[in-house]
Image (spheres, rainbow, N blue to C red):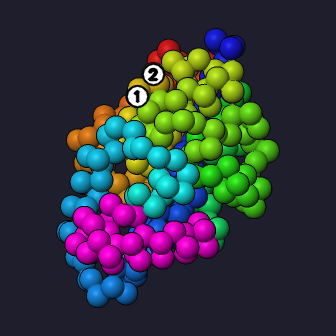
Amino acid sequence: MTSNALGVIFDLDGTLIDSMRSFYDLVVSNLEQRNLRISIESLKKVGTELIEDYKTAPSGQGLRLVISLFWKIGRKSGLSRLKTIGFSFNCVSKARKVYYSAPLFADVKKTLLRLQEAGFHLGVYTMASRRQLMETLVKHEINHFFNPKGLISRNDVKRAKPDPEGVLLACEMCSIHPSKGVYIGDMPVDVIAGNNAGTITIAMTTGLVNRRIFEQYCHPTAIFDSLEQATTWILQTISPNSPNLIF
């Protein structure tokens, strides 16, 4: 491992890909199909309860883990067990289409180029499948920015976020020491995983979680509303040429 190398590891959904609001709409529409209209306040409560549930790594992997997440959402939203079965599998069956149609955030390519030109090693750690990860990066023409060995999916780990396994593996594959790495994500489990791995952590409000929730549940190093803001901060405080270098 190159101890002097600096790197940034990205989450995918809600961080590079603007997919979380589409998933939100998918959940709401499927609840409404089961005659359950849920208020914004109730959904926020469900989200908070899920944050509590996932402070420790959930059991299961792959499709089982995804179904488990939708199951929890259905039950916590008030669906019966029978209706939750239909809700979960309906969400899973439509999730791939929603995922594939989600766009890149507008500042992603500019962000990746700036970091690459500054000498940062770049990787991804996502709980999406390896197939989804690779298809997404290729589709949006950003795969060339990343170290191909540093693209870590749920298929590459035994323990899901917030366990640090995936962050540590991505750092290792990108030849960076965790203490010289940054993990960027849009969910508390991302921040907790990065904190547990010993990286700098950046929380993004580009998903469904606001600043207050991040501050309350996971204490990231920094919180930003856009990748452009996060990149500027990284280059000003972490880049080897920065007078404010924090390492």
Q: Which residue is mark 1?
A: 195
**Residue at the image position 79 percent from the left and 44 percent from the top:** 144
Instruction: Give the residues in magenta.
Output: 70-99
How many discs appear? 2
Q: Which residue is mark 2?
A: 198
Q: Residue extending furthest top?
A: 3
Observer-nearest residue: 142 or 35? 35
Is residue 26 depicted above or below 125 in this figure? Answer: below
Q: Does the image show residue 107?
A: yes
Q: Main secondary structure of the magenta part?
A: helix
Residue 140, horizontal then vertical, whole percent: 73, 59
Q: Does the image show residue 202?
A: no
Element under label 2? loop
Q: Amino acid at mark 1?
A: Asn
**Residue at the image position 58 percent from the left and 58 percent from the top:** 17
Q: Are marks 1 and 2 in contact (CB under 8 Å)?
A: yes
**Residue at the image position 62 percent from the left and 61 percent from the top:** 104
Q: Amino acid at mark 2?
A: Gly
Membership of 86 in magenta stretch: yes
User: Marks 1 and 2, how far apart in space?
Assistant: 5 Å
Residue 115, horizontal then vertical, whole percent: 66, 36
Q: Label 2 crowding class (10 Å Cα cut-off): few <14, some 14-19, many 20+? A: some
Membership of 129 in magenta stretch: no
In-image side of 241 versus 36 (left or right): right
Residue 197, horizontal then vertical, whole percent: 47, 25
